[in-house]
Image (cartoon, coloured by chain):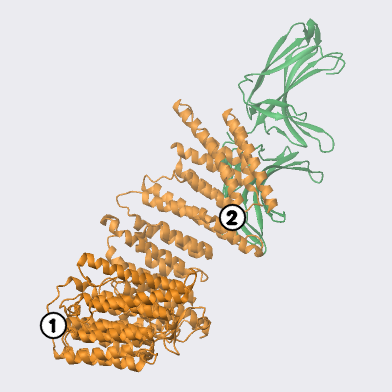
Amino acid sequence: MSLFFKAPIDIEIRLDGEENRSHVELVNNQGRTEKLPIYKDGESVKGLVTIRTKEGRKVEHMGIKVQLLGSIETNTDSITSSDFLTLATELAAPSTLTHPESYSFEFKNVEKQYESYRGKNVKLRYFVKVFVSRRSASEITREKELWVYQIVDLPMESPIKDDKSKATTVKMDVGILDCLHIEFEYSKSKYSLKDVIVGKIYFLLARLKIKHMELSLMRRETVGVPPNQVNDNETVVRFEIMDGAPVKGETIPIRLFLGGFDLTPTYKDVNKKFSVRTYLSLVLIDEDARRYFKQSEIFLYRDQ
Amino acid sequence: MNKDKSVLQGCLSTISHQSNLMKQNLNDNNLLVALKNSSNFLNELRVNQLSPKQYYELYISIFDSLEYLCNHLAGSYNMKKKKNKDTSFLSDLYELVQYSGNIVPRLYMMIAVGTTFISTGDAPTEAIMKDMIEMCRGVQNPIRGLFLRYYLSQKIKDLLPISNEHEFNNTVEFLINNFIEMNKLWVRLQHQGHSSERELRYKERKELKILVGSNLVRLSQIIDDYNDDHYSSSNFYMKKIFPIITEQIIQCIDPLAQSYLIDVIIQIFPVNFHFKTLNELLTKVILNLNPMLNKSELIDTLIDRFINYNDDEINLNDFEKPEDFEILKKSLFDNFWKFYLSLVDKNLPIKEHSNILVNYLKLSINFDRDNYENLNRIYQFLSEYNFDENEGENVENLHEKEEIWLNLLIIPIRNFESIINLLNLPFFSEIFNKLTNKSYQKTICLEILNKLLDAEDIIITSTDDIDIVFKYLLVLIKESTELNISTKMGITKSFKINDNKTLTNDFLTNQNKICKILSKLNHKSTDFSNKVSDLIYIKKKYLSKNISSIILTYPTLIQLILNNLRFLGMIRKSDIKVVNQFKGLSMILDELYEYHGDYYSDLIVSLYLNLAIVCDSLNLSTLTFEIFNKIFIIFEEKLILGQGSPSNLLNINNDPHNSLNYNSIQYQTIVTVVNKLYFVRNLSKDDYQSLITKVTLYGSKLLKKQDQCRGVFNCSHLFWWTEPSPYQVEDSEEKDEEESKETKETEETKETEETKETEDHEEPEEIVEPKEKYLFKDDKRVLECLQKSLRTADSCIDPYLSNQLFIEILNKCLVFEIYGNEMITANYINRLIELIKTNLDNLVDTNNLKDNDDKEFKLYVEIKSFFNRTLTFIEQQKEDEERFLDIET
């Protein structure tokens, strides 16, 4: 761990059936691609820890343990981290390692309450961490990150309780006095990540010289609680749905496949620390490049 | 403009670059990259600055590139199918291309992939079609939208499913939908941009019209291609297509769209469809179009379609015709007429009226050639409708209105079979009479005249017909001969008829044509007396209305009557009625003489002569005698004093030495009279002698020596009949119908005319056997005449002329010698020859004729050669016929 001392042992964490699992690919801050195995809520995390001494040295240790941790790291003003999940298992009593040893571990049916998330100001991580305690020197640790998906099978069984209307259409009626009056309609307000947003826009009045119209999906990450809340907005998708100026009475269809975009399911008040929401905006751009938009939140969830 | 060009070039080069990359990637099996490339070049179609024409260039270039992509996709699909591999990639691709962030490239890609998918036959065709057409709504920019939808229609046009009713209905709906949307975009284009560019927009839209029309074209093919037991394309059209598309067209109000699309409908759908929807098309659709629109063009197209259909109708079998074709045909005009009446309320410009009515005429001509009722309807309307309701009656409107009338009157004249029926329409003549512009009336009359002349059949068969036709021709007959400026200035050619009358060439031509009509009058009939009375009727009622021009028409009329009378006379000899009719004819001539004797007495004389000869041939000797006396009166009244014919006679080359070339009108008249008189056979001897004596006297009293001389020796023939008269032959042919029709414009033509006339009279007769009859011969008087001529010739001061005349007399002597006049002896002739020889020698001596260029020398040479020819003739006769044996040369 230190630049000067090479750790005398190698710790390798292997998860069972890792090769056959599906992985996510993430690009980390350094621009390198990471591949992380995907776990679901309630799934057991099983694996094997192998410890090798380097160059045949003898290493004395005060005991080996493994933890499954779930933590939220925020970096709003300073990096703070809090664990919402801590499970630990003892792997070995204190002894001396002379040759490679393997220890299997298993956390059974772990409840993983949240999804893994890497945002701008907040990270939600799950990882397995192995500790090798030593008497004189600092512990030797090794982490292995997991990626957790929360699968919602049916939108009907939405985990969000306050949502009363179940997958009904969303209709909106907006306008600028004597200038523009449109009605638009999305087929529903909740979408799975592979879903398609379908809808239409009906122009009741169109005196505005519209140049084009687009849909945009914006992800908003909110960290902290007011008044110290930090927001980060990121436009994930911009999608032109109309070219040119329509006249009164025109209906413009909307269809946006979500599956191909990097979207995040909606997280609300994760551990009272952060939220991630997605907003769907209808943006009209006129000939003078002015933008008129109407935003509405859509609920995204992950399904099979 | 240059900037636009560089934009275009930029776009085109990007397209070509990206499409090359695409092809390369496709060949390397890099489908996704290739799609990216195509999306890149499709992005060029989002450009704003280009005109429709330039945009079309982009479109074409992109179309080709996408075609390459489509073929590649179809190819790999087929390959996979052959190898039984998974072929779902096309449907995945259809979804994949929809991620494209910009709508225009996205939709092109969707269409390219979607139609390729459909073409494999394994696709959910209906769903894809619906999806594509629905998504196209997203492009609301007119030009981009139009081209996008055009791309859709081009790509799908051969894939449209029609294998069952459901599919067929969907397909039709698809096409109509696309049509409606394209039309909307097209109309909207007009309102884009600044209002000062309206003209430019209009022009651009015109260039784009074919894009919109292509949908209708495909639609018409589809409803024609579809086949089902209970399906009738025309019914389907009437119920499902016509109402929708026309509704759309009416709604859009735009004049350009309306005129073009209605035109397309008329052109592309079969005529039997139009039969079914005609009433709706006219009263519900065309009537409700933008008032600015010129409906006449549409009517024109529609009527043309009907007319062509009718022309081809013969080639159609019954199956192809609508069942109730005949009924439809009958109601066709009624429908159009109903439409017109409702259109009229809408304050139509005069020009529109005219165009529409002209088309109606065409329709009527084509569909119902023998129905004049429709025409009458049109004319009645014209005469009753007040065109100037709102504009007030002013000169310009009046002029315009009459121009229309003129046109509407002329077309049927040219096209309808029976001009009599046409002219007889009460409202035809009403309109005609309402024309205030006389030159229009004249134009119409001329048309009538030409039509009559062109007709091969007999047109005018009754007195009623004569009235119908001549009522109009009267305009030409009575035409005022007032001259316009250009004639007065001498720019247009003109002719003097009398002192104070000048006529234009046109007028002469018209009169000439009227004369031709006269001769066509019932010309195959053999009822001569009826023809004569018809001609006299015409003369009384019409021709005599313009006294100053009867000189142009009467000669023909007289000649025609004369011909008919001659036949009549041969059938009913010396019938008192015939005699009276001859007298009547003579009266007509008197009338002509009365008004035109001062200038046309020579022409009148020859007409009298014709009359006299016919009378003589029918043995009406009293009449013959009287007519000759009349001729002498004319001679004395008008000719002796050197008047009686147009002054342009002076133009003639006055060479006294040439017996053929040199003519005074008096001399010429004498010769003509002699010619005819020579063949008069049925007069009593006393009458005859008194006539010929008088002529000879006139001959000897002519003004000039050479005229006297020649006049007298010509008269000498009258005393020596050598053959029976050709005019006595019973069934001599009518030869001179054409004659004297030509009003003699100059004296020269007149001369040739007259020579021809005499030839014409003499030629055919030679074939006929001569009848042995008493021939009047008086040798003493012949000699007297020759002596008189010799004396006159001798008294000429001009020696050349004198000798010329001697030789001419010598020739006469030879003739009489041949015909056995005993008084003209060989001795007499020898003396004459001797005299001429001496004179000629003297001429050479006294005048010292040597110089070849000398005029006198030339004259001498001519005379000398004339003399030599005469002598040669004598020698030849000696050898060939053993005549003149006693004559010495």
The answer to which image quadrant residue A79 occupies is top right
Residue at image position (28%, 88%) is: B696
Quarter of the image containing the N terminus of chain B? bottom right
SS at badge 2: helix
- Chain that appears green: A
Q: In screen coordinates, is B419 left or right of A55? A: left
Label 1, on which residue?
Answer: B774
Pick the residue in front: B590 or A132.
Answer: B590
Subunit of label 1: B
Please name the residue that numbered disc 2 is placed on.
Answer: B142
Amino acid marked by disc 2: Pro
Q: Is residue A6 above or below residue B176?
A: above
Q: Is residue B510 left or right of residue B872?
A: right
Q: Is residue B371 left or right of residue B795?
A: left
Nearer-N-terminus badge (1/2): 2
**B786 or A153: which is nearer to us?**
B786
Which image quarter holds the C terminus of chain B?
bottom left
Secondary structure under tag 1 reads loop
Residue A40 appears anywhere in the view: yes
